[in-house]
Image: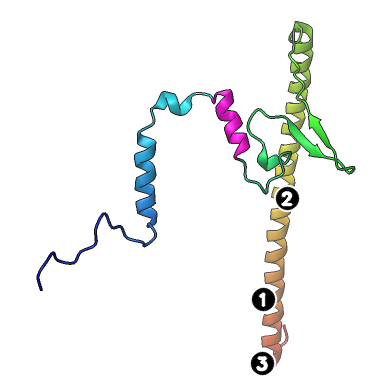
Amino acid sequence: MRGAPYAPAGVTTSSAPLTRAQMDSIQKALIAGISMEEWHRPLTPQELADVRSRREPGLDPHGRAARLPGEPVYAPLMNGGYAVGVPLISIPVFGKSRAQRRADSIIDADYLARLARLQERLAQQRAIAKADSSRRDSLFRVAKADSARRDSLLRVGRRP
């Protein structure tokens, strides 16, 4: 047979799906090409609009899972509408006065002293309960041993 050998023309690739390791290496190569400044910079308004327009079509645009950071919170109402949550900011202009801080520290010290007394009382009650339990167990063992001794003596025919 004369002529050129039979071979496929062009580039051939495997039609098998990529393995997890192959996908990871491709993603690492793509991410490596992005500089850290570009990676951490805030989105431009155009990019943010693109992200919002590419949302998954099945998600409710007002749902919690569909929100991007910084968007307002929407809560569904019974009538089919939505309530928008607006964060309120409270900035304290002045701190507590010296007298108020002193009063708070006195109250705090009193509460800590009460707590210490209650914890000490609880520890004492636990120790008493443990001692009573061990005393009960030892008395039960003595009584059981005594009754066993009495039973063995009765079996032999002697009186205790």
The first of marks 3 and 2 along the sequence is 2
Image depth: mark 1 or mark 2 in front: 2
Q: Residue at x 63, y 31 (%)?
A: 69
**Are discs 3 and 1 less than 8 Å apart at CB?**
no
| Residue nearer the viewer, 100 or 158 | 100
Q: Is residue 111 magenta?
A: no
* Amino acid type shown at disc 2: Ile
Report x, y in % for residue 100: 79, 11
Q: Residue at x 38, y 27 (%)?
A: 35
Q: Is residue 55 left or right of residue 19?
A: right
Say which mark, if any, is on residue 128: 2
Q: Secondary structure at mark 2?
A: helix
| Residue nearer the viewer, 130 or 101 | 101
Q: Is residue 69 left or right of residue 84?
A: left
Q: Which residue is mark 3?
A: 156
Report x, y in % for residue 64: 70, 40
Query: How many other residues sit within 10 Å of disc 1, few (<14), some (14-19) or many (≥20)?
Result: few
3D distance between C-alphas at marks 3 and 2: 42 Å
3D distance between C-alphas at marks 3 and 1: 17 Å
**Are discs 1 and 2 less than 8 Å apart at CB?**
no
Q: Residue at x 69, y 54 (%)?
A: 130
* Amino acid type shown at disc 1: Ala
Q: Secondary structure at mark 1?
A: helix
Bounds of the magenta segment: 43-54
The quarter of the rendered structure image containing the N terminus is bottom left
Q: Is residue 48 magenta?
A: yes
The first of marks 1 and 2 along the sequence is 2
* Amino acid type shown at disc 3: Val
Q: Which residue is mark 1?
A: 145
Asked if 96 appears above or below 45 in the picture, the reply is above
